[in-house]
Image (cartoon, rainbow, N blue to C red):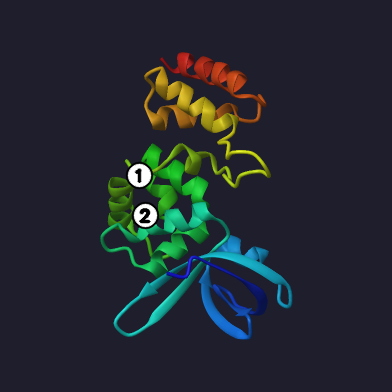
Amino acid sequence: MIATLEGKVAQKGVDSLVLNVGGVGFFVSATAAALQAAKVGEGLFLFTKLIVREDAFELFGFADREEREMFEKLTAVSGIGPRTALQVLSALGVHDLALAVVTGDAKAIRKAPGIGVKTAQRLLLELRDKVSNEELVGDSFAAQAGGAPSPGPVADAIEALCALGYAQAEAAQAVAQVKDQAQDSAGLTRLALRALSRLR
């Protein structure tokens, strides 16, 4: 599998680009986030996924590892092909899609082109247990130089609430409401607990 590509952007379209790598032009269907970072004539690094079909080899590009992982989860859903998965990711992004899944928000998922009521419900059903806290908060887990990857205070707060017995969806919603009111996980956890206590 072609896992990553790094080269110069030769062409850029609405939903695809051509990346020149060592004199070879790779046609890549890409997410909105990946295309936003692409500038013709400049260098670009992409996470990629090669889909092999009977009649074609298709290469898909992503801004980060989290996008690629969510794409793989989407294409594992029955009836969801790579093109549809790419449209869903471009329309919602990893964070909003993950939040829609854990909160059962079919309306949010239907914002993506080509997603009807039944498809949205199927996505919710099949992805419900596959969404991670990292995807919920949209953090990047690239390790800093000399350090280990760290999920950050929002993910830590969600994990703390789950350890206290709250459901993942409930914890994620509570932390999302207060994420701009504190900088550390302890503060976020306290504020989220207050929000949850008001609802009960």
| Residue 107 against residue 12 in the figure, above or below | above
Residue at mark 1: 130
Q: Is residue 176 at all visible to an observer of this figure?
A: no
In the picture, the quarter occupied by the N terminus is: bottom left
Badge 2 element: helix
| Cβ–Cβ under 8 Å for marks 2 and 1 | yes
Which amino acid, mark 2?
Answer: Lys
The residue under the point 48% across, 31% down is: 173
Q: Residues within 10 Å of mark 2 (few under 14, many from 20)?
A: some
Viewed as shown, does residue 56 lie left or right of 149? left
Q: Quadrant of residue 185?
A: top right
Give how far across and how far down residue 107 sits, in percent.
40, 48
Viewed as shown, does residue 186 lie left or right of 52? right
- 3D distance between C-alphas at marks 2 and 1: 8 Å
| Residue 70 against residue 104 in the figure, above or below | below
Residue at mark 2: 73
Viewed as shown, does residue 183 lie left or right of 120? right
Q: Nearer the viewer, residue 124 or 60?
A: 60
Viewed as shown, does residue 149 lie left or right of 106? right
The residue under the point 53% across, 28% down is: 156
The residue under the point 44% across, 45% down is: 98
Q: How many marks?
A: 2
Give how far across and how far down residue 170 sits, in percent.
41, 28
Badge 1 element: loop
